[in-house]
Amino acid sequence: MKKTLLITGGAGFIGSHVVRLFVNKYPDYKIVNLDLLTYAGNLENLKDVENAPNYVFERADICDAAAMTALFTQYNFDGVIHLAAESHVDRSITDPNAFIETNVMGTANLLNAARTLWKGNYEGKRFYHVSTDEVYGSLGETGFFLETTPYDPQSPYSASKAASDHLVRAYGNTYHLPFVITNCSNNYGPNQFPEKLIPLFINNIVNNKPLPVYGDGKYTRDWLYVVDHARAIDMVYHDGKDGETYNIGGFNEWQNIELIKLMCEKMDEKLGRRPGTSAQLLTYVKDRPGHDRRYAIDASKINKELGWAPSVTFEEGLSQTIDWYLGNDEWLNHVTSGDYQNYYSSQYAHR
Ligand code: NAD
Ligand code: TYD
């Protein structure tokens, strides 16, 4: 094996697409997927690669510093792609400490383990931290997030991700740890846990459940197909410059309400329902506290420097995503049984 690469959070939504890409594209890398398998982690996401000779799964908690040091010692990693995190804003509002522990302390433990293992001998080494555009805060009606936009996180989730970004840069500055950071816009696609907007609404439409639109529905997000995020991660891991940040986005802004109407139309078509049927499920509910109004990424740096651009149009990506959920009801049933029901009633009962 040429390289041993640690991917954290590989059983989650984006992580599973990254693991699949690396396992298939780089047969001479050993890919170690470290994941705690929280409610968001699911090994069913990786069934197609689980027996690959260059793939290993390790169940561990990034908050366990000793376990991180032991794993780094055991595998002697050349590189880290760090995605493990608590990732849902609504959950961060109800339980901020879980976000502070995993996203901040967990990242610190990985940085410490890398620093200890690599002992200043950084030749061929790289710590890649995967982050979000939410660290930049909220935009007004115009403008875009650039890599130089000052951090202004507004939710416990984005504040914890911002803290982790700062730690990675501080380790780069202080200990010369070679790092790259990417800040990406909202992802959608197969295997996303149905607590985020698109899969939650697909699941509710299928089951004829109300579609809870927060506030006035005029919040704007920039949507990127998850496979294109994984492609960007591959490019940045291999060709990005040490110490640099790259913004990744879909050049694809949608007001929530417009996106939801489009999803309803597509779902009516695919489910053979009369046009307008699913839109009757739209229900305006109490807003999310501190709800960021608009996110939009300027992804020209990664485009110009590394030649990355989205490969899938939103129309295609959304259609493929809906088809995936409609064709994978077993996956959906597994992740929406048990605890999901408790989450759903505590999150939505009082809205
Ligand atoms: P996800 O919630 O689907 O997956 C997170 C994974 O991390 C899960 O497999 C979970 O089991 C694992 N995990 C959580 N706590 C852990 C711990 N203590 N130890 C080990 N593993 C743990 O998240 P996602 O949407 O795939 O996001 C992945 C990363 O990308 C996150 O860092 C997130 O901040 C970032 N990101 C997400 C988006 C998005 O739209 N989803 C956009 C930009 C950046
Ligand atoms: P989400 O998928 O949670 O991503 P983020 O908050 O990280 O951008 O939400 C996307 C947008 O959809 C956001 O403006 C909140 C809104 N939203 C709803 O209107 N209803 C819902 O049930 C959910 C989960 C989100």
Image: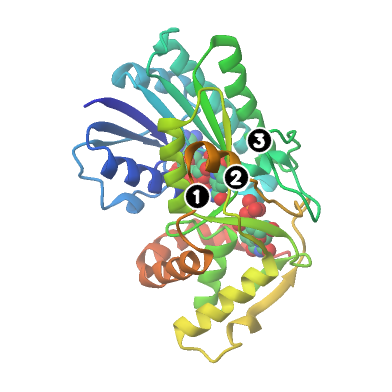
Q: Which residue is mark 2?
A: 299
Along the polypeptide, which appears first: circle 1 or circle 3? 3
Q: Are marks 3 and 2 in contact (CB under 8 Å)?
A: no
Q: Position of residue 48 (x, y in %)?
A: 26, 52
In space, the residues marked 2 and 1 are separated at their CA atoms by: 8 Å
Would you say 173 lies left or right of 114 here?
right
Q: Nearer the viewer, residue 60 or 179?
A: 179
Along the polypeptide, which appears first: circle 3 or circle 2? 3
Query: Residue drawn 61% across and 59% down?
Result: 252
Q: Which residue type carries mark 3?
A: Glu
Q: Position of residue 250 (x, y in %)?
A: 57, 54
Q: Position of residue 261 (x, y in %)?
A: 63, 76
Asked if ligand 1 lies within 8 A of label 1, the reply is no
Against 333, residue 230 (above or below) is above
Q: Position of residue 266 (x, y in %)?
A: 52, 78
Against 113, residue 149 (above or below) is below
Q: Which residue type carries mark 1?
A: Ala
Query: Residue drawn 41% across and 12% down?
Result: 118
Report helix, strand or loop for mark 1. Answer: loop
Q: Which residue is mark 1?
A: 309
